[in-house]
Every structure is written in structure tokens, then in C-alpha cells.
């Protein structure tokens, strides 16, 4: 059983009082497509596609995130990110299992290095929410290490490569793991003299804001490494009051917080929506970082937005927002030495 799930089960059997709020929210996330359809009173015709497409890539969505969606609206922009639909089964040219070349950039199991100075650890095989457009929806997570000892080869590899100065904790979502093992890892990384920064790529503060605990802030602030938190929100409706407060707590603790979004048809492919997202991020002291062109992963073609349209939207954003609030519009090209700026 995957460690997080084992841990959650343990917490539940040990008695509910021992569970922290975020672990309860994670364990209680909706995983049954019928339950999601019922909760949101979606039209009956959504049921079949949801059942079918969740078999290939399971549905996972926390209840607090569902609470930010409109009832009875299958086109709700938050729902669209998480609801399995029949279109996912359609083959589309150029949409493949590994669109970003993760496999060939894998140095050791769970350790991916594409860019100078930066190495990425695929720390967990799970997320608090399964985004239907995820570029890692077919990632071979079963090949990645589980547990601290299993990570030792990757840590040794990082230690033996003085060209590295930054480690990115990714996944899955690294913050589905508890703070104690994460802190232990941060300590091990801080012992490597050539490392300068520790970056966390996570959607947890958005979908389960309770994840921003004192312990999390504690180990992020406590490390010698410069911490950077990169969250992932695509639509202004994701940033409700709880989420906004969680982001502000990170920032108030002195942690730089950036956002990356993915340009998604039917979710945020309007300048107005993205401008509101950027404004709202700023309101909560978060800077927009990247707007990613969709990675062509199998099953996500219905989210595709043409780059020409993306460029129009960006021009509109540049006109409406201060320069620092306009995200960089980028594409990931396998083999390229960095993310590639579009336009
Ligand atoms: C995106 C990515 C990074 C980070 O790139 P930045 O441009 O520094 O944000 C690092 N490693 C891998 C494998 C990535 O996919
Ligand atoms: S949170 Fe990130 S890694 Fe997880 S499913 Fe969504 S896009 Fe993929």
C-alpha cells in the first residue's frame, strides 16, 4: 500500500482525534464518480463518461474544493479540471503518454534532471486532486522510491553533483507526505554544501488549505536552504477565503510564493478570467510565475488552446496588468535547456 494511504489508514484506526484536519480532508476526498455527480446534482448523462474515464486515471477531489463549484453546472471551471469525461478516451494525434520527456531525463528512479543547476524529486505518487490534464497522468510512479531509505541513492547522486544548486520537491504532490519525513529530507539536503535552494511544487495549499500547518512553515523556514513555494491554481474561483489565508500565512512567514497555471480550454482561456486570477493572487501576496501551454498528454486534447490564441490572451493581460503580475507563457519542449517562452 502507498505510504500516505497506509499512514492515513493508521491515523483512522488509531482514532479520529489523532488526525490533523488536512489528513482528514485528504482521506475523505471524493473518489467515486457517482458521488461527485450526486453531490453537485450534475445531469445524468455525465455519469457514464465519469465512470468510464476514471478507470484509466482515478477521480480524486477534496470536498472543500467541491464546495467552491457551482451546483448543477457541468461546465463549472473547477469541476472541468477534475471531472472525468468521455472525451478522454478519444485518441488525438500528438497526444502521448510522456509528453515532456520525463523518462529520458530520469537520472535515477524518482530523480529527474533537465535543466542546469536544478534537479527534481518525484517524492510522491499521489495528489490531493487528480487534474484531468496532468502531464504526469501516465507517469510510472510504481518505479519511484518509497520511504526515506529508498531515497538515499538519489540524495547521494545530488551530493555527488556540484553543478546542482536547487532541488525541487515534486510528485505527485510532495505535500501529501507528512511534515516529519519532509523535514528529515530537507535536513539531509541542507547537509549537501553545494545546494542553495529548496523548492516545493504543490497544489495542496490551494485544494486543501489546512495543509499549511505550523509544522510545514517550521521546516520550510528552518532550513539553511532558501525555500521557494510554487503553488498551482488556474481559476480565480479556486482562491476562496480559506485558501487566500493559507497563502498569506506562507508569505507572512517570509516564504516566497509563486503560482503556475495551465492554459485550459473551458477553464481559463479568456483574458478576463486570467486577469482576475492574477489580481486575486496578488491580493494574497502571490506572484504569477508561469502560464503553461498544455502538455499534450494522452486524454487531454479537449483542453488544448492554440498558441495563437494564448498569445492574444497574453497581449491582453500585458495591457491590463502591471508587468510583474503577467505570468511567463511557456511550453515544455522535450530536450530543450529550459522552459521555452512562447511568442
Ligand atoms: C519545470 C522543471 C523545472 C523547473 O524549471 P524552472 O524554469 O526553473 O521553473 C526543473 N526541472 C524539471 C524536470 C522541470 O520539469
Ligand atoms: S496536482 Fe499537479 S501533479 Fe497532481 S494531478 Fe494536478 S497537475 Fe498533476
Image: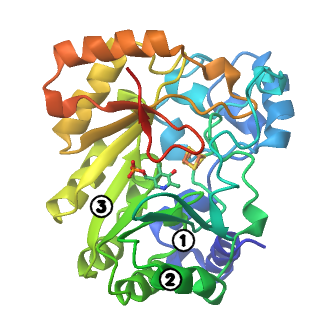
Q: CA distance from mark 1 to mark 2?
A: 7 Å
Do tag 1 and tag 2 residues touch (Cβ < 8 Å)? yes
Residue 98 position in % (x across, y down): 71, 44
Residue 240 in view:
no
Query: Residue 243, position in %: x, y?
Result: 33, 46
- Looking at the picture, the colour scheme in use is rainbow
Q: Position of residue 35 (x, y in %)?
A: 72, 38
Is disc 2 in contact with disc 3, using a CB cutoff of under 8 Å? no
Instruction: Identify the image quadrant of the C terminus.
Output: top left
- Mark 1 residue element: loop
Q: Is mark 3 within 8 Å of ligand 1?
A: no
State the residue position of label 1.
177
Label placed on residue 228: 3
**Relative to 152, residue 171 above or below:** above
Q: Nearer the viewer, residue 268 or 129?
A: 268
Residue depicted at 48% across the width and 45% down the height: 64
Label 3: state its secondary structure: strand
Q: In the visual, does 88 lie left or right of 117?
A: right
Residue matched to label 2? 181
Q: Within the image, what quadrant is residue 61 found in?
A: top right
Q: For the residues carrying marks 1 and 3, which lies nearer the camera in this image?
A: 3
Q: Earlier in the sequence, mark 2 or mark 3?
A: 2
Q: CA distance from mark 1 to mark 3?
A: 18 Å
Mark 2, Cα crowd under 10 Å, few <14 / some 14-19 / many 20+, is few
Q: Tell me if mark 1 has few (under 14), some (14-19) or many (20+) residues whose alpha carbon lies within 10 angstroms of its own.
A: some
Mark 2, secondary structure of its residue: helix
Q: Residues within 10 Å of mark 3 (few under 14, many from 20)?
A: some
Left or right position of 30 against 292: right
Amino acid at each position: 500500500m502507498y505510504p500516505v494511504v497506509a499512514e492515513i489508514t493508521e491515523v483512522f484506526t488509531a482514532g479520529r482525534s489523532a488526525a490533523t484536519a488536512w489528513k482528514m480532508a485528504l482521506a475523505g476526498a471524493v473518489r467515486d464518480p457517482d458521488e461527485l455527480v450526486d453531490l453537485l446534482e450534475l445531469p445524468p448523462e455525465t455519469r457514464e463518461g465519469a465512470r468510464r474515464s476514471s478507470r484509466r486515471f482515478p477521480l480524486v477531489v477534496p470536498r472543500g474544493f467541491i464546495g467552491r463549484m457551482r451546483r448543477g453546472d457541468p461546465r463549472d471551471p473547477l469541476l472541468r479540471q477534475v471531472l472525468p469525461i468521455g472525451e478522454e478516451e478519444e485518441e488525438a494525434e500528438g497526444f502521448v503518454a510522456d509528453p515532456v520527456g520525463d523518462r529520458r531525463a530520469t537520472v535515477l528512479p524518482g530523480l529527474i534532471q533537465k535543466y542546469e543547476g536544478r534537479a527534481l524529486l518525484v517524492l510522491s505518487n499521489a495528489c490531493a486532486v487528480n487534474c484531468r490534464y496532468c502531464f504526469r497522468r501516465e507517469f510510472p510512479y510504481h518505479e519511484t522510491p518509497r520511504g526515506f531509505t529508498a531515497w538515499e541513492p538519489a540524495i547521494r547522486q545530488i551530493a555527488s553533483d556540484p553543478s546542482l544548486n536547487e532541488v525541487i520537491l515534486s510528485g505527485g504532490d510532495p505535500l501529501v507526505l507528512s511534515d516529519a519525513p519532509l523535514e528529515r529530507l530537507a535536513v539531509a539536503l541542507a547537509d549537501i554544501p553545494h545546494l542553495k535552494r529548496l523548492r516545493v511544487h504543490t497544489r495542496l495549499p490551494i485544494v486543501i488549505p489546512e495543509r499549511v500547518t505550523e509544522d510545514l512553515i517550521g521546516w520550510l523556514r528552518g532550513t539553511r536552504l532558501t525555500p521557494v513555494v510554487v503553488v498551482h491554481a488556474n481559476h480565480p474561483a479556486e482562491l476562496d477565503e480559506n485558501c487566500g489565508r493559507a497563502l498569506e500565512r506562507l508569505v507572512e512567514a517570509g516564504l516566497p510564493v509563486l503560482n503556475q497555471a495551465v492554459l485550459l480550454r473551458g477553464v481559463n482561456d479568456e483574458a478576463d478570467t486570467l486577469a482576475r486570477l492574477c489580481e486575486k493572487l496578488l491580493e494574497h501576496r502571490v506572484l504569477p510565475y508561469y502560464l503553461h501551454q498544455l502538455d499534450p498528454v494522452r486524454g487531454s486534447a479537449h483542453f488544448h488552446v492554440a498558441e495563437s490564441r494564448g498569445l492574444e490572451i497574453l497581449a491582453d493581460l500585458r495591457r491590463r496588468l502591471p508587468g510583474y503580475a503577467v505570468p511567463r507563457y511557456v511550453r515544455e519542449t522535450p530536450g530543450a535547456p529550459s522552459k521555452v517562452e512562447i511568442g
